[in-house]
Each structure stands twice: as C-alpha cells, then as structure tokens.
Amino acid sequence: MADPITAPAPPDLEDRPVVELEDVHRVYPGTPPVRALDGVRLRIGAGELVGIVGPSGSGKSTLLNILGTLDRADSGLVRIDGHDVDRLSDRRLSALRGRRIGFVFQQFFLPPGVPALDSVADGLLYSGAPPERRRERARRTLERVGLADRAHHRPHELSGGQQQRVAVARALVGEPSLLLADEPTGALDSASGAGVIELLHELHRAGTTIAVITHDRNVAEELPRQVHILDGRIESDERVGRR
C-alpha cells in the first residue's frame, strides 16, 4: 500500500487549498502565558504567492513553525496539502515535512566547501533516488533559478544573492507543494534582495505555492497577497493585484 504522504492526493482533495488553518491556537506556558496564535484562520491556494507580515513578537515565527509542521497547534485545524496534521504520527509528520514542504531561511545554511550542485542534490537525500538521479535533478533546478553556470562553485565563490538562489534550489529540488521563505532577503543587500524577490515571482508564475514570512513591509508590498499578523491574530488579508 502506498504511503499516504507520497501517494497522489485523492480526487476529493485536488481542489482544496495547500494550507488550511481554522481557529488555530498556540499558547506557550509562562506567567502570564504567551498567546502566540489566537484563533488564526488562513487559507493559501495552490499557486499563490503570499506575504505573512508582522513585527517581532507578532506570532509570525510561530505561524511559520505551524505551517512547516515544526510545531503542533494546541487546538484548531491545521491541514497541509490535504493532510490533517493532528492525525499524523510523528513519523508521518516528518515525511510530510520532508516531501511536501521546502524551506528557505535568512541564513543560507550552505555547507562550506561543498559545490552548489551537491548542496542542491542533498535536498533529495531522503528521497530514495540514486546519486546520479539526484544530481541530474539538482542540475535542472539550478538552471531553473539561473545558476546553471555556477553548479561547481562553492559558497565562498558565490555572492550572497547567488547563495540564496542555491538555497532556494535546494528547497525546490524535491518539488514541494509549499515553499516557506523566512526573511529570505534579510541577509542581502538591496540589489541582491530584489533579485531573490524577482526569483520568487518567477517561481510563482510557474505555479509554485509560496509563503514569504517577513517583518519588512517593503518586501511585502512586492507580493500580490499580504496577510498581516499582530498579537497572534490575523489583522488583515489583502490582495493588492500587483504583478
């Protein structure tokens, strides 16, 4: 029998959003307790590019952890790519995270001395694919992000913007249902940051579902949908019709 994480979604799930959150709560113990998420409702459809925007302490990092299945909600519905997270064992939750969700962080986390091609291929280590197939998919993905000619360059031979593109390629190589980008321009100068945002738009136009978590309103203003979070609650959800 096929593993439900790797098998295609059944027909009745095909039209559902990639992300569904309904009345999600997450409280951290303390005196007083911290209500990191307080009744969050959020849906992200397949192929959307969404900015999740808020200041430090607003709850956006907790929301990222919930969306990425790095943490579980205390209550409410969390469904990622048609899978009810609360119903999954830790093993199947790890499988969902590894096969359906790609992560891009502010810091690139590229291993020093390792060529870009191998860093990207490492994104498929747990896929079961043989090494040559992993490297071929890595080549195609580097080409997709405009770095085919940098495949054998090591991190110290790449600019910051190029390193972030390698990190994006590593997140994409497994063809995830959802790409989560956490402050993807935070460690870059303005020109390199603009290049990364343009890359995300290109991926969006090609059909990738992307959520960008940021405190930077300038970054958010470049995105077609902006979800603002404050004190653990969705303050506004706007489609601005750009790009």
Image: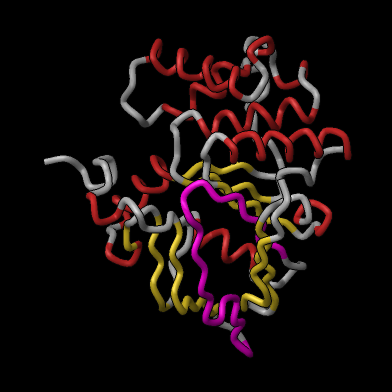
Residue segment shown in magenta: 31-53
Q: Nearer the viewer, residue 217 or 126?
A: 217
Residue in the picture at 62% in, 15% down: 115
Q: Nearer the viewer, residue 94 or 165?
A: 165
In magenta stretch: residue 45: yes
Left or right of 158 on screen, residue 25: left
Q: Nearer the viewer, residue 97 or 230?
A: 230
In magenta stretch: residue 218: no
Residue in the picture at 11% in, 41% down: 1
Residue in the picture at 24% in, 56% down: 12
Where is residue 227 shown, x and y percent of the image? 65, 65
Where is residue 104 shown, x and y percent of the image? 61, 42
User: Of all residues shown, which one is farthest toward the left?
Assistant: 1
Residue 34's place in the image compared with 177, above or below, is below
The quarter of the picture where residue 155 lies is top right
Left or right of 67 on screen, residue 36: right
Query: Magenta: predominant secondary structure element?
Result: strand
Left or right of 87 on screen, residue 54: right
Residue in the picture at 57% in, 65% down: 63
Residue 6's place in the image compared with 162, above or below, is below
Q: Nearer the viewer, residue 112 or 67?
A: 67
